[in-house]
Image (tube, helix red, strand yellow):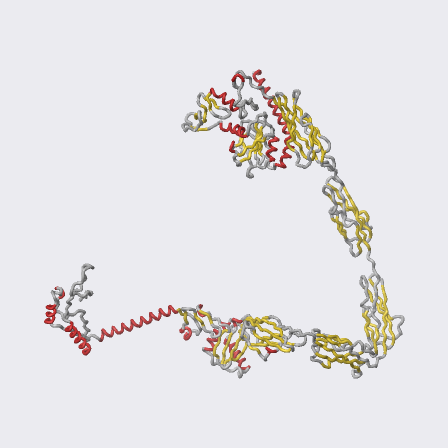
Amino acid sequence: MGKKRKPDCIILCTSIILCFIAIRDISCLDDLIQKELKNICPSLVPEVYENSILFGGRNAGNYEMVAHAKNLTACTYSCCQSKTCHIALLHNMQCVNVKCSSSEACQVKPGRNGTTVVVVRNVSSEDIGYSNSSRNASSVEANTSSSGASASDINKTLISKEKTDLRCEVGLMQCPKNQECISFGNHRRNGLCKCLSGYIQDSSTDECLPSDNTVVAASEASTAIPSFSDESESTSLSATVPASSSLPNGQSASSPGIASPKPIEKLVVSINNKTVTLPSGKVIYEDSVMLSAYAIGAPTGMKYEWTLIMKPETDVEGSVSDANSQTITLSHLVQGVYIFEVLVDAPGVHGEAVGNVTVLPAKRINQPPKAVIIPPSQKIKLPNSGVILDGSSSIDDMVISSYHWEIVTAPLGYKLSEETGATLQLTDLIPGNYTIMLHVKDEEGLEGNTTTFVNVVKETDYPPTANAGGDQIIYLPQRDIILYGNASIDDHGIEGWEWTKGPKDSGKAVDMQDTRTPYLHLSNLEEGHYQFILRVTDGNGQSSEAPVNVFVQKPNMNIPKADAGDDLQLVLPNTSVVLDGSRTTDTTPNTHWLWQQISGPNTVHFIKTDEMKVNLSNLTKGKYVFMLSTWNGDDPAKNSTDNITVSVIQDKNVSPKANAGGDFSMTLPVSVVVVDGSKSTDDVAVSKWLWEREPTSLAAGKVINGSDQSPLLMFTDVVSGVYIWKLTVWDDQSASNSDTVSIIVKEGQHYLDEVELLVGGDIGTLSYSQLSTLLQKLELFLHISDHSVIIHLLSATGIPRSGHVRLSFLVFAGENIVKGPEVVSLLRHQIISESSDILDLPLISIDTVVCQNNCSGHGECIQSSRECRCQTWWMESFIRRHMGDGYQNCDWSVVYVFVTICILVISIALVIWGIIALLVRKFGGNVRPRRKLPRYSLLDNHEETNKCDHSCILLKRKKREKTSCKISREEEKKVKTHLPGNLLDSGSESESDAEVLFDSRKTKHKNDKQRNGYQKLARIRT
């Protein structure tokens, strides 16, 4: 038993060692390769599926052979570079890129053919998963050989194992040629397809071939695709011989005389990966890097071939030397990963490996942060006692992690609370110098600092400046005056005032009041000279003084000489002027002034007339003369005068500008509407006014007092609506201008409750007492419990040529208004119908001002006549109108009225007929009934018949009795003898006076002709 287990142990240990070596080589490259490929293929699946195939087989998509890719890394990289590639598939060192047709076709499932699959991209954003069985996350590469099979051959190989197990049902002929369905067990119909006896299944095509042709088929298959061994885990390439080639002596490749070629051994090749770092401040690695390959157990005479698989995407082209030696030299490298593949060949052996050179970026040298304070220094003056320092502009090559403020120097007593933010706010600063430092640190603890200076200056307090005003002079008998010191100033305000007499004072007595205020009141002054000193003091005790002199003199009794100035000339449209009498001489503070208008085209407007300078306005074209009168003292008679002429000229006539006053609105009731157009202007004067209605204006309203030709338009009797008036103005040169104004007259808030009462009487004879008595009596009739009723009269107007007076009013019950229809109903029933004789004035009618009759809902009320205009097919109920409440209405439907009338007429006719019939039956029994005339007569010659008929008619007219012509039997016989044949029916013979001689029976057939002697008439029943 021990001897038998030794070979198994050796094989197992060898397999473990080989797997460990392979895993070790790939695991060293796995992280770096994934890092580089993730930039190109973000959706790359890191797992490597070994011994796997695709669900779709050859229908999974488009297969594309990549000749230069000989390992899994190169194959995956080539698929990543192709935007249409989804699956990287490696089989026997042959790379195939698969463009999947669907996500289902490219699902990965386990197989036994040694194929490695890598999912590079998903199809239609759906993950391509691994179905069922084992998932090998290692990056083990399959052992490869140098076969040159095409993509289609590889595809056939991939799906060959899929076709091996073909299920079937016994008896349904579902198996391929030369195969039969073998049941899974007794009494089971399902099974598997197996080759018939004498046939062997070809492993390459899954076809069942005769046992003698198996070798030939195997040799032919070997020319196309690699062969697999189900018993071994490694894959080897058998000798491939073209089908058309021949061997010496005509022997085949499978002949026992020819020895099979020796298999190629695989070398284990390793590369020492290199990692270098760029120098500081450099982007290209200038030094050289050597990359060497080592083959374990390699014989002498090895050949090396290096191939660049992947490099960083950059415009800088690096250089490589000694590409066919064991060691290559690289230079001019940039940051990134360079991946190289080396192929090592020797007689009978082959090996390959993948290595890389990683160029790392230059190591960063951390620089300390740079602190910056804005502003770097500043100076402030009290009372401003706060500053803001901003350190957020500090910079660092990384990130500033902390800020710390520190006061280096400060006035004694000032402290700063710990501040760690980027901004520092200082308040309540006291005078002095401040030095403040800012410390900033980065993430690695390096620190930078800077300082700022703040100078707080105490504000300079300047002394006040006193101002007692100018010197004053007064004339007796004036003995009092006020001195003003309020013009004194200080930068912080004056807190103290003091008035005293000055050293240059004449010593005269005076009464001084309010000496501690800005205003000094002096009284009882005497003739002479006075000096007063004003002293002002600020809050710090600083003071200032200012003198002022007051001169008291005897009155100047001289008459001033008036001078009104030179004559003036104005040019329209300027209509105002200033008159100046400052050139008048011998004036005193007691001089009086008086300006008067002597002449002019109109009266001008003086703002003031008792000052030296006056303003005049409202001048027009023409000449004006003004007089200035001046005098001293209290005697206006001792004066002097001077005249000034002001000429107003017009260079160019300017059209007037009409101003109708602007649109406005008002609410009824209103007695008079006034529209103001007096603001119309002209450079000289407006000479004519005219108000006209616009065509779209209401026609109601009456202009009073001829105001339509004046600046103010007045009209009365307005109703609700819009009135539009046009104002036209003219000047004396017939230039005109127009303006329009719209007046909107709105109904009153309670216009629906206004009541209109029509009483008999003339408006010219109706006295106020009669009207008051009438209203008081109406209030009594409208009395409501718990409320006093007040009638508010709105208007009382007379109706021309009618002898009636119309009163409109509102009724208030307390603070509430009584509804108009309710008032009308009460007054109509109580006054007009019952108590009209109680009132002194006869009441004609009462109704609401606005017609509120809904006309039974079938018409509309006409406001002017208060009549209802009914709709089509509706009419007024005269019963309600004349016998009921008396209101206009549209109660009756015309259709119903017509139908009712017809029914009444028919009913009356039937009643009359019944009465007549009853009377006839009761009183008409003795009357002989009128005999009905016979319809038929005997046939005779026409003359006799006509004579008989004529005699019958005569008798009938004379006697007014019913009779019949009797024809004797002889005549009847004569008629019968004259008629050819018997024309009388046997059933028609009768002994009556009038016998029917004709048969009026219908013919049996429609086509039968009428019988001779018969008259086609209806049968008469007797």
Above or below, 368 against 480 in this view is above
Q: State the residue at coordinates (70%, 75%).
A: 651
569 or 265, nearer to the observer: 569
Q: Quadrant of residue 351?
A: top right
Number of dots carrying numbers: 0
Q: Position of residue 43 (x, y in %)?
A: 59, 37
Say if residue 133 shows up in the picture: no
Above or below, 885 against 376 in this view is below
Above or below, 101 against 638 in this view is above
819 or 974, nearer to the observer: 974
Answer left or right for 42 relative to 486. left
Answer left or right for 280 relative to 174. right
490 or 102, nearer to the observer: 102
Say if residue 659 shows up in the picture: yes
Answer left or right for 69 relative to 598. left
Indicate the quadrant containing the C terminus: top left, top right, bottom left or bottom right.
Answer: bottom left
Q: Position of residue 225 (x, y in %)?
A: 54, 26
Q: Quadrant of residue 380?
A: bottom right
Indicate the quadrant containing the N terminus: top left, top right, bottom left or bottom right.
Answer: top right
Q: Position of residue 531 (x, y in %)?
A: 87, 72
Q: State the residue at coordinates (69%, 79%).
A: 602
Q: State the residue at coordinates (30%, 72%).
A: 909
Q: State the residue at coordinates (86%, 69%).
A: 547
Q: Position of residue 508 (x, y in %)?
A: 88, 75
719 or 267, nearer to the observer: 267
